[in-house]
Amino acid sequence: MRHMFADNVPNEVSIDPFGMFCDHGLVTCRLLENVSQAITAKHLLRGWHCIDRTVLCYIPEGSPLCHRVLKDANVDDLIAKYMNV
């Protein structure tokens, strides 16, 4: 497997503490890499705290989804009603 930075040459190499050349020094560097444009997304927030919950409780009562279902009701028809309402 090829490493994604295999073709890059390190830039601005430094060793901390300065002047110490042993296996205990902290080596840092920069790799110059072309980075593509960041992906953005829209986020929809709903203001649930602004909803009148009393009114919201009455809305489903008038909906066809809250009507009585007959015993011989067709499942496909019920699903279609749900999707349409």
Image (cartoon, rainbow, N blue to C red):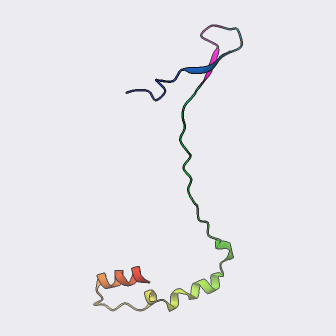
Q: Position of residue 38 (x, y in %)?
A: 56, 46
Q: Is residue 55 above or below residue 2?
A: below
Q: Is residue 71 above or below residue 49?
A: below
Q: Residue at x 58, y 61 (%)?
A: 43
Magenta stretch holds residue 27: yes
Q: Residue at x 71, y 12 (%)?
A: 18
**Number of callouts:** 0
Quadrant of the image for the C terminus? Answer: bottom left
Q: Residue at x 54, y 31 (%)?
A: 33
Quadrant of the image for the N terminus? Answer: top left
Magenta stretch holds residue 35: no
77 or 1: nearer the viewer: 1
The answer to whether 80 appears left or right of 18 in the picture is left
Q: Position of residue 27 (x, y in %)?
A: 62, 17
User: Quadrant of residue 25 in the image?
Assistant: top right
Q: Position of residue 61 (x, y in %)?
A: 51, 90
Q: Is residue 39 above or below residue 47?
A: above
User: Quadrant of residue 46 in the image?
Assistant: bottom right
The answer to whether 65 appears left or right of 41 in the picture is left
Magenta part of the protein: which range? 21-30
